[in-house]
Image (spheres, rainbow, N blue to C red):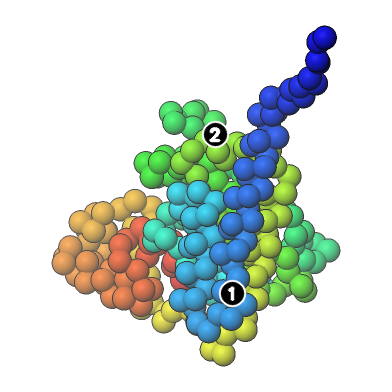
Amino acid sequence: MFTFTQVMINPAPDASLEADAALHRQELKALAALRPLGDAAGAVDIADALRNFASALGALHHAFLVVDRSADNLPALWLCDDLGGWWKDLIPPLHDLLAPHPLGGVTPLSHTWFCVRPDRRDNEPANYASLRKLGVRRGLLVPSEARRPCEVAGCILLAFADNVASQTARKNEHFPACIAHAASLALDAYRRLPHPPSRKSPLSARESECLRWASIGKTSWETACILGVSERTVNFHLGNAFLKLNVTNKQAAVAQAILQGLI
């Protein structure tokens, strides 16, 4: 007498489904990192939550900006990032994304992906060179939803080193929505602060002039020759600008000055 045992053979899991599930778990972990924003008592709390959020998503660098959309040059009211000024080459697409829409508001899921090839391409933006040096291969800019036309908006910028991981994220239609949700929560937390961080002290005319020349790649020595002063004087003015803008290097100072409409 023979006994037959029915054996169920499970098919191999689909690789794409596994990737989607892994990304979903990653998003949940990242969103959990945003819980402290509900009780944020200061700017440091907001910055810490955003750092943990970006880390959970595997981002190489991150930044969050609060931008005044009522001004033509879209000055930044507040900024937190992990590496001062890494995002300065993304200012043009950032402005395009945050510029007030003719009908008012910012579409909640509007976003911009950017790709930095390992080797320079003839048709790529010239300002991608510095991003390439940082190891950035792909990134994402996502604004929060503006409640009314011409008010402040928040925007999260993420940069990835792993092109494969970021391509997986790009294929997931929910990923930008996750980032937009984070930007909205961070903006709400900022606006709830008793005394929101204000814009930095305005620069003197000479400090602005030195930063303006630095923004087009002039060295301190070259700027000194142009202005007819000593290199030491130029460095003195740049140092004062660093203190006022709360940065530690020329690149970050230029980025802050541009965003705040100071140069």
Q: Is residue 170 visible?
A: no
**Does 159 appear above or below 200?**
above
Residue designated by label 2: 164
Q: Nearer the viewer, residue 45 or 255?
A: 45
Where residue 112 appears, as percent x and y from the top left, is 64, 48
Quick check: 199 left or right of 186? left
Considering every residue shown, the one lying at the far top of the view is 1
Distance between mark 1 and mark 2 Cα atoms: 30 Å
Q: Nearer the viewer, residue 28 or 100?
A: 28
Where residue 224 appears, as percent x and y from the top left, is 22, 61
Quick check: 64 left or right of 97? left
Residue 37: image tag: 1
- The quadrant of the image that shows the N terminus is top right
- Residue ID at (59%, 67%): 34
Q: Quadrant of residue 16?
A: top right
**Does 174 appear above or below 257?**
above
Q: Label 1's element? A: helix
- The quadrant of the image that shows the C terminus is bottom left
Quick check: 199 left or right of 110? left
Q: Nearer the viewer, residue 130 or 18?
A: 18
Q: Label 2's element? A: helix
Quick check: 177 left or right of 208? right
- What crowding class fits label 1: few (fewer than 14 Cα within 10 Å), some (14-19), or many (20 or more)? many
Where residue 198 appears, as percent x and y from the top left, is 50, 82
